[in-house]
Image (spheres, rainbow, N blue to C red):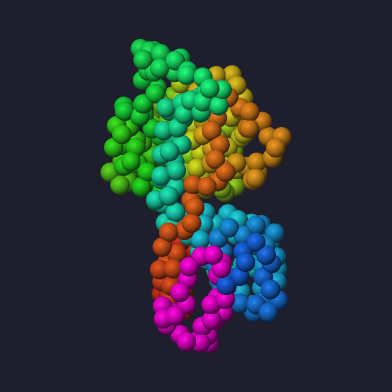
């Protein structure tokens, strides 16, 4: 095989030598928010991370010699939507964000359960809100202020859930996963997706780690929300397209849902006119859970070696 040209985002560390075995290979950094320069349209491999849709679509159209796209994001939905040719191999960055996403998810869960949004609102008004303390001490509502004994359902039980579930369990939560097939994973019970409806009425916190696929679009809709008890809380750190945002806002406004926290929304950046901004008891973070891919250099080196050797890529996306 001749040497290959590999395009990598300039802000992701990738040591091209000596980690790559063939001296003929060339690693070229590019600015991921700009179209690929004309002199690099002969690239064989494109590594992408947070490139806008317009850049990916442009790359799919102009990089006619491309043979493989490696995204460093956990979900490949943006790359799949770009329209790369069917013979272009696509692999995801699943596993590179497990720790950081698990941390952020735990932070959002604790923030909504402990009513940090209400405390911050009171702080901005210079108010010492004694009502929160009384509510937490109440025999009726006090148990909803803690994860100790809470029934937490994780919808989408993959590698991120494997990092998150033990953290929740360490705080006393009773964790159940939901996946395509039932069983036990990483020491936690997992039910099949058709059984989710039976699980939700007994759920205190629902966490979604679902990917964006045609099958998961608006998976959390009005009917699904209605199955949750009114004291329940919802956290989404998967993909925004999996949530019917109109139904979520309606549930929050009607007190059919006690609270929610979102790191992702269907349209990003979230439009200024979106009703999510002013929905009660809702915490929003701007798609920052994953952060920088962890261990990107080692992962990419191993992937390139596997690709050149034909021994099989990790996280291969089936189209």
| Vertical placement of residue 277 versus 314, above or below | above
Instruction: Answer above or below: position of 70 versus 284.
Output: below
Residue drawn at 47 percent across, 77 percent down: 16
Residue 90 horizontal side relative to residue 159, left or right: right
**Foreground of the two, 218 or 276:** 276
Of residues 106 and 149, the one nearer the viewer is 106
Residue occupying the point 43% across, 50% down: 100
Q: Position of residue 309 (x, y in %)?
A: 43, 79
Per the rendered image, the range of residues in magenta is: 1-28
Q: Looking at the image, can residue 80 be seen?
A: no
Q: Give the x, y percent position of residue 89.
A: 55, 68
The residue drawn where x is 61% and y is 70% is 30
- Which quadrant would the C terminus be assigned to in this image? bottom right
Residue 287 seen: yes
Q: Residue at x 60, y 21 (%)?
A: 253
Q: Nearer the viewer, residue 183 or 100?
A: 100
Q: Is residue 19 magenta?
A: yes
């Amino acid at each position: 095989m001749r040497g290959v040209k590999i395009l990598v985002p300039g802000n992701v560390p990738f040591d091209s030598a000596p980690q790559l075995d063939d001296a003929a290979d060339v690693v070229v950094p590019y600015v991921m928010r700009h179209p690929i320069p004309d002199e690099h349209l002969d690239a064989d491999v494109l590594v992408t991370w947070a490139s806008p849709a317009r850049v990916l679509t442009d790359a799919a159209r102009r990089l006619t010699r491309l043979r493989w796209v490696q995204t460093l994001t956990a979900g490949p939905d943006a790359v799949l939507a770009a329209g790369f040719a069917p013979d272009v191999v696509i692999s995801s960055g699943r596993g590179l964000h497990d720790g950081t996403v698990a941390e952020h998810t735990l932070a959002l869960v604790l923030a909504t359960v402990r009513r940090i949004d209400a405390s911050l609102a009171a702080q901005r008004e210079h108010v010492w809100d004694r009502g929160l303390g009384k509510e937490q001490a109440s025999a009726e509502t006090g148990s909803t202020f803690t994860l100790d004994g809470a029934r937490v359902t994780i919808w989408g039980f993959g590698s991120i859930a494997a990092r998150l579930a033990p953290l929740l369990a360490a705080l006393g939560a009773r964790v159940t996963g939901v996946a395509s097939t039932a069983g036990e994973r990483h020491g936690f019970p997992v039910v099949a997706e058709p059984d989710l409806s039976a699980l939700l009425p007994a759920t205190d916190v629902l966490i979604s780690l679902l990917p964006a696929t045609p099958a998961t679009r608006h998976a959390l809709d009005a009917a699904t929300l209605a199955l949750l008890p009114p004291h329940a809380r919802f956290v989404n750190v998967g993909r925004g397209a999996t949530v019917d945002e109109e139904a979520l806002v309606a549930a929050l406004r009607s007190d059919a849902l006690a609270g929610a926290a979102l790191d992702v929304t269907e349209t990003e950046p979230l439009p200024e006119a979106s009703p999510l901004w002013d929905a009660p008891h809702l915490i929003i973070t701007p798609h920052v859970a994953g952060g920088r891919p962890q261990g990107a250099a080692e992962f990419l080196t191993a992937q390139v070696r596997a690709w050149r050797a034909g021994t099989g890529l990790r996280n291969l996306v089936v189209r």
